[in-house]
Image (cartoon, grey):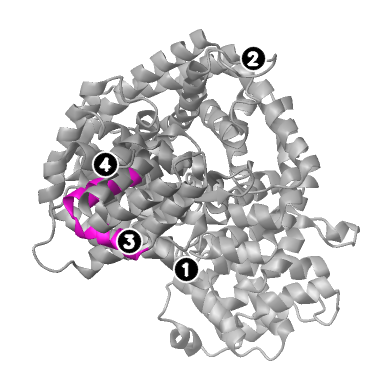
């Protein structure tokens, strides 16, 4: 084996001009002139080394005379280019295999290989080299101490551990770094290192795992390695429960990273019970912490961890109702203190993070309090549950109202230049969750904020705000019901339930009309329909947001007929529905959306006058599809003869029944306004089908269904003599059927 003395002699024998020939790329950073001269000679020796022994000796000499901390990046790059980028990997492979061809002990090979890689990884460009990425499994094996060799030389010293973590951390910082580490087994290796309490595993390994379990790789990591991550979480929760005072406060922020993502399966019942136990034990520690006197900086991590635990199991494990009220109250106080600042005040990032956690507690409290208020006669809450009494729910709603008053105040100060700020989105989203349940409180303030709410959602719909920060925030905070990529439609999705309520009230509706809200909803429907079709090439998955948008548009259609007649966006909507409804008629899983589209189109159709020229193809296509759709809801039973909900509609009847009845009434209005539709009713076979069914069967599902059918049949009889005759003939033949119970229709067609 050659040593550093061999190479020192070789270096000293080089011609004096050698240093000048090799110089020029890097100056050596903080080196003295003597060190730079030795460095240049070593670089020359590296380039002309005949064996690995000469290369290693030159590197050892460099590391002794020129510490890496004194070398700048250009100089480091020259060193690695001189030695060859494959050398560190060869050193690690040689050490792991235990071959003695190098002449160096295994530990020295590992130490030198990891040191070289650590230096190499300080340059982000070099950290992404394939030669470095191939060493990741070897480095992970070192930090996890996966070797079965239990001799002293197999132990991990701190310097080597630091070098390994330096490389792994540098790779993790690359754009695709977390995915590179995940695919190369980082999660199980790091979990093993923490479990065995290996050198620096608590200081550096947990931090690295935290990065892998935050953002885009969180779901994938839990899906691939649920057992290892559950075991890690169990261990960390035990440490949390056994820690004291400040250490426990510090662990609150750390634990947030290691909780499983919401909505991702983490195992079967046994593992789920284990996870429940972990969450329950954490709540047991958090409750006395929440009741203690805490500074704003101390309570922040506690509130954020509480919010994350609520995301997983809701209020089920949080504790008794009294504690739940306390938790909500503390969160609301923090929101009021944080947001009720003079205009122009910038909130520090730490406070924004705390307030975001508070918002999630408030969102969870809204549903809990509203459900308790609505179910006053429900069974008394069992012990150890978080079910609120009516008095407690009213108390929670009061403190929530005060907190959302502060939220509204803060949003009133927002400038359009801030629309891409993730914290503004978090604040907006929280307010929307409250407005979805409660629009009667703070009505004037909410109406005054509508200009911001619509402007904010429209800006994102049009892509006028930078989305990258919001996308990253959604990933980090696990905020996404769809668990999909961020789109500009998301803000409007959260606002839609509130718009459904507000469009039904005259004051807010007038403001919404001045903001051109119907056009925004039509754009949303069109974009959502396009993305729905593109997901799998065919329409398949249900999108409740589209149904809610239809409900809001339906409110405008019912209450603002003149706006519907004059606003161009409603003509755009008609054209859209004429294209979409024929597709939906054949999609059973989207029946409720089809019912919305059908009813909305018919409600608009009744406001139109008869066309002066020929009927447009789009209009004919829509009404033909609507008639086929409405006809499919009911079916005749054989024994006893009765009319029942058809098999295809049974599952969705609770949601679709009212829309179906409203659609039939609107069909009657369409026939009266546009008599040509009456002829279509005969051509499409709707009238024949309904008369046959009503004539054979003695009973309809309910009185409302009978009234809706009678309304449509009366309109058809009024506008079409042929239809009137067919109805009269059927009523005369089957006086005892369901048709015979329709008195207004009997009178109209002249049947006694």
Q: Are marks 2 and 3 in contact (CB under 8 Å)?
A: no
How far separated are the C-alphas under marks 1 and 3? 32 Å
Residue in the picture at 37% in, 37% down: 707
Residue under the image location 35 percent in, 41 percent down = 710
Look at discs 4 and 3 and give the one toward the viewer.
Answer: 4
Task: Decide if residue 187 is on the left or right side of residue 655.
Answer: right
- Asked if the residue under mark 3 is in contact with the one under mark 1, i.e. CB atoms within 8 Å, the reply is no
The quadrant holding residue 314 is top right
| N-terminal label among 4 and 3 | 3
As measured in the structure, the alpha-carbon distance from the residue carrying label 4 to the one carrying label 3 is 18 Å
Residue shown at the point (61%, 52%) measured from the top left: 208
Disc 2 designates what residue?
Answer: 381
Residue at the image position 61 percent from the left and 24 percent from the top: 246
- Cα gap from disc 4 to disc 1, whole angstroms: 46 Å
Q: Find disc 4 in the rendering and name its residue.
A: 748
The percent coordinates of residue 651 (x first, y second) are 56, 46
Q: From the viewer's perspective, is the residue at label 2 or at label 4 nearer?
A: 4
Q: Is residue 651 above or below residue 125?
A: above
In the picture of the structure, the residue carrying the numbered disc 1 is 538
**Between marks 2 and 3, how big is the CA–CA gap?**
58 Å
The nearer-to-camera label among 2 and 3 is 3
Horizontal and vertical percent for residue 397?
42, 17
Q: Is residue 494 visible?
A: no
- Between residue 209 and residue 229, name the one nearer to us: 229
- Which image quarter holds the N terminus? bottom right
Q: As displayed, is residue 578 above or below residue 57?
A: above
**Magenta residues, as a range?**
664-684
């Amino acid at each position: 084996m050659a040593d550093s003395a061999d190479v020192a002699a070789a270096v000293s024998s080089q011609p004096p001009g050698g240093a000048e020939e090799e110089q020029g790329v890097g100056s050596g950073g903080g080196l003295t002139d003597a060190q730079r001269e030795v460095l240049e000679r070593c670089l020359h020796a590296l380039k002309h080394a005949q064996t690995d022994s000469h290369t290693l000796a030159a590197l050892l000499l460099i590391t002794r005379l020129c510490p890496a901390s004194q070398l700048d990046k250009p100089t480091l790059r020259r060193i690695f280019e001189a030695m060859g980028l494959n050398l560190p990997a060869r050193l690690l492979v040689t050490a792991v295999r235990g071959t003695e061809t190098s002449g160096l002990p295994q530990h020295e090979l590992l130490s030198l290989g990891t040191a070289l890689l650590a230096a190499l990884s300080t340059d982000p460009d070099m950290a992404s080299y394939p030669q470095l990425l191939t060493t990741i499994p070897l480095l992970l094996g070192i930090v996890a101490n996966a070797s079965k060799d239990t001799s002293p030389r197999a132990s991990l010293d701190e310097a080597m551990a630091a070098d390994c973590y330096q490389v792994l951390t540098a790779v993790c910082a690359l754009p695709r770094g977390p995915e590179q580490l995940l695919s190369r087994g980082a999660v199980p290796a790091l979990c093993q290192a923490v479990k065995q309490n290996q050198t620096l595993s608590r200081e550096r390994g947990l931090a690295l795992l935290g990065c892998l379990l935050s953002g885009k790789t969180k779901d994938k990591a839990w899906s691939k390695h649920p057992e290892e991550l559950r075991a890690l979480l169990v261990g960390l929760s035990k440490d949390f429960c056994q820690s004291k005072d400040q250490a426990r406060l510090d662990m609150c922020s750390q634990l947030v990273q290691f909780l499983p993502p919401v909505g991702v399966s983490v195992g079967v019942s046994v593992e789920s019970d284990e996870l429940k136990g972990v969450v329950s034990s954490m709540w047991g520690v958090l409750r006395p912490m929440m009741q203690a006197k805490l500074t704003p900086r101390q309570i922040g991590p506690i509130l954020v961890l509480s919010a994350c635990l609520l995301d997983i199991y809701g209020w089920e494990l949080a504790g008794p109702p009294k504690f739940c009220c306390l938790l909500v109250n503390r969160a609301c106080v923090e929101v009021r203190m944080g947001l009720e600042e003079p205009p122009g005040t910038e909130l520090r990032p730490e406070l924004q993070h705390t307030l975001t956690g508070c918002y999630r507690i408030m969102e969870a409290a809204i549903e809990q309090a509203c459900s308790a208020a609505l179910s006053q006669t429900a069974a008394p809450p069992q012990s150890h549950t978080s079910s609120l009494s009516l008095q407690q729910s009213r108390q929670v709603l009061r403190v929530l109202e005060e907190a959302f008053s502060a939220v509204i105040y803060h949003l009133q100060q927002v400038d359009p230049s801030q629309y891409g700020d993730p914290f503004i989105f978090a604040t907006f989203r929280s307010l929307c969750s409250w407005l979805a349940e409660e629009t009667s409180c703070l009505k004037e303030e909410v109406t005054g904020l509508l200009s911001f709410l619509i402007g904010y959602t429209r800006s994102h719909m049009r892509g006028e705000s930078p989305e990258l920060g919001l996308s990253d925030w959604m990933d980090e905070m696990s905020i996404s019901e769809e668990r999909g990529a961020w789109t500009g439609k998301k803000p409007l999705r959260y606002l839609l339930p509130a718009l459904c309520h507000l469009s039904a009230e005259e004051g807010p509706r007038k403001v919404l009309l001045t903001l051109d809200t119907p056009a925004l909803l039509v754009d949303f429907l069109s974009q959502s329909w396009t993305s729905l079709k593109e997901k799998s090439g065919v329409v398949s998955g249900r999108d409740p947001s589209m149904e809610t948008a239809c409900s809001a548009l339906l409110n405008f259609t019912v209450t603002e007929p003149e706006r519907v007649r004059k606003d161009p966006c409603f003509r755009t909507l008609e054209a859209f529905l004429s294209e979409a409804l024929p597709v939906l008629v054949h999609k059973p899983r989207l029946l409720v959306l089809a019912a919305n589209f059908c009813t909305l189109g018919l409600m608009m159709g009744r406001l139109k006058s008869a066309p002066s020229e020929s009927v447009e193809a789009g209009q004919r296509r829509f009404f033909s599809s609507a008639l086929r759709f409405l006809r499919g809801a009911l079916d005749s039973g054989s024994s006893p003869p009765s009319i029942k909900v058809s098999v295809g509609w049974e599952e969705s009847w609770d949601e679709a029944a009212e829309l179906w009845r409203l659609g039939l009434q609107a069909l009657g209005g369409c026939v009266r306004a546009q008599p040509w539709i009456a002829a279509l009713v005969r051509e499409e076979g709707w009238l024949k089908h309904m008369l046959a069914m009503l004539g054979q069967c003695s009973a309809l599902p309910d009185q409302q269904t009978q009234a809706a059918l009678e309304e449509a049949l009366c309109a058809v009889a009024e506008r079409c003599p042929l239809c009137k005759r067919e109805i009269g003939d059927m009523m005369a033949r089957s006086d005892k059927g369901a048709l015979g119970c329709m008195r207004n229709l009997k009178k109209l067609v002249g049947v006694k």
